[in-house]
Structure formats: structure tokens, C-alpha cells
Image (cartoon, rainbow, N blue to C red):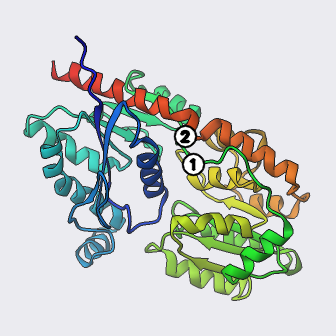
Amino acid sequence: MPNTRPLRVLLICSGLDHAHRGFESFARECFDALRDDPALDMKLVKGSGAAGDRERSVPTLTRDSAPVRALARLSGRQAFRFEHVAFAFSVMPVLLRERPDVVFLSEWHTGKVLAPLRDAAGRSFALVLSNGTMALEGFGHLDRVQELSPAALEEILARGADPERHVMLPLGFWIDPQVEPVTDDDRRAARERLGLPLDRRILLSSAALNRHHKRLDYLIEEVASLPEADRPYVLMAGQVEEETEGLRALARERLGPDGHDMRTVPQRQVPELLRSADEFVLASLGEGLPRALIEALAAGLPCLTHDYGVTRYALGEHGHFADFSRPGGLAGLIAGAGFDGSPDAQRARHRYAYEKYSWEGLRPRYVELFRDAARAARARRS
């Protein structure tokens, strides 16, 4: 008689409840979307925060702790990498007790440390990585890798990756089936609540406050290159990182104190930011599948992005694309023809996002990914 028990899946995320990045947002949404699926017995383990039903935190070194900050300064590496490594050791006792079939994570370094710990303990759980950083190599310790776009999968396979190990599956999102378009009055009310200018065009960036990946220095310089009368107000919302203070100084110098704002908000406040904005911009040149971009699209906003395969897949015909690797690329988009913010345009953007990325449509495919990974782990053990 076949084994019909639910598949035991442990979703782990070191930064959940103290970091505000795409990995953490996805972990929360994924757990909430899949926890009640009858095919799964799903639990969540995080590096901080309160415990809950099938959800717990374990003591670990976090990216903002003094030891980790010191290691980051001495090594020149990002603090979150040390957190990811430390979390592997912190979470291993939980894995030994829970005996999961599958461990699902987005942090490559955590998986890299867990694989030898798993083998040394004689356990056989599958490791499944959601490849949100679009890593291009180093997958030998993983049973399955979730690639988030066709462009990412094509690039990986072109480099000689095992096609059985890599699966194309986009991120899931909580998106309502229907959208109520944002009116001018709605937008003004949101700005009043957020303390934003009422009479300025607002360009929103929701991304980690850094240079090396999210390229907020490029965003600042591109807006500053426009005539002052044509500049939008730039709202940058994201996680504070080592480069943030330098970006604050650059923004004060190039945009002035009345031309911008930087803030960090919890995920639940992001919809209010989106309601306040006229357009959304993502200045990075490479992503797995940018959550903030899909959230903005689902909210009906015009989205301005670098032109490459991932963003073409993410936005389809609803994106506004330019070469952000060169000066003037973003500035040209901002200064070009006006973007359609009509109710019909908002509904069309939302519908595209809902049909492509809603958990309602993607949930069965995640369940199948976990089943496939568990089969691969059993074959590896045999």
C-alpha cells in the first residue's frame, strides 16, 4: 500500500523577523501559502522573532550582532553571509529532531554548510534552494534548485548544469483576484499618512539600500541629471546595509533634502508605499526574479527597469525598459513620454501579475517540486 502521509517540509530562513529583504518576504508568504496544504506537513524555522503555530526561532548570530559586524569589517564580506553560515549550525539540531523529508531555503551558504552536516549525521533530507540571487554554479550539494525565470534556467543549462536538478518555477505572491485602481484622492491620502510631498511626482524604489547590487547611486545620479523642474521626488525604501550612510550623503548632495527620502519599513507597509507612488523603479542589472517589481506591477504601477531576460519575463508587455548600464538610460525613461496610470492600465498590469504569479495558480507546482526533491533524495540514499 503506498505511503500517503504528508511530506514533511521545513522552510528555513535566518533573517526572517529582523531583516527586510526579498528572501524574508518570500519565506513568510511561502509558509503562509503552503502550510495548510493537505499534501504537506510544513514548519518554519527562523533566526529571530516570536514562535507561533508550526513556527519557531532558534538562537543564532544575526547580521546586526557585534561579532558578525566585526567579522564583516575584517573580511570585507557582507554581514549576512556570516549569519547564513551560523544559522546552519543553529538549525541543525532542529533538523535532527524533526526529521524532515525536504528542507527549503533561499540562502546558498546555509545549504552549503548543511549538506556535510546532514551527511555526517546520517540523514537524507533533500535540500532545495530557491535561487533568488541567480547563482550560476556550486549546486552539487543540492537535490533541486528552483530557477525563477526561463532566462535564468537557460543561462544555468548553457553553463553545463544538470537539467534534472534545476526546475523553472517563479516566486509566488499573495495577489487579490480583483484590484481597485488607485485614484488621485487615494494617492494623496496615502502621501498624507506617510508624510510625503502632495504635489510632486513620486518615483519609488523598494530595494536594499546599497550600491553594489541595487545600484541606488545610479538611481540618484540619473534623477539628479535631469533639470530640477523635471525631477521626480525619489522615495527609497529598503533594508539598511553597510553602504547606506554613503548613499544618504550622496542623495543629500545630489537631490537635496527636499528631493528624496530613505526609510526602512516592515513588509505590511509596502502596499501603502505603492499607493503613494506614480512610478516604480528597479536599478539593479541582475536578479533572480525581483519581488518588489512584481508587487509594484500587481499594484498597477508603471515599472521602469533594466532591459534583460529576467525583467522581460517578469513584466512582459507592461514594462518600461532601457539600458541601465549606461548613463542616461534611466533618465531617458523618466524624461520620456508620460506613463499610463489610468484605471484600465492599472487593471491590465494587475491581471498579468495575478495570472502569472498568484499562489492560487502556483501552489500545486511547489508541492510537486518538494515531492520531486524527496524522490531525488531517496535515489541518492539508495
Task: Answer with the quarter of the image where residue 228 lies.
Answer: bottom right
Comparing 187 with 200, the one in front is 187
Label 1: state its secondary structure: loop
The reply to whether discs 2 and 1 touch (Cβ–Cβ < 8 Å) is: yes
The residue under label 1 is which amino acid type?
Trp
Q: Residues within 10 Å of mark 1 (few under 14, many from 20)?
A: some
The residue under label 2 is which amino acid type?
Trp
Mark 2 / mark 1, whichever is N-terminal: 1
Q: Residue at x 54, y 38 (%)?
A: 170
Residue at the disc numbered 1? 174
Residue at the disc numbered 2? 359
- Residue 303: x percent and y percent? 73, 54
**Screen quadrant of the C terminus:** top left
Taking the image as shown, residue 200 lies to the left or right of residue 372, namely right
Find the residue positioned furthest to the top: 1
Q: Is residue 76 visible?
A: yes
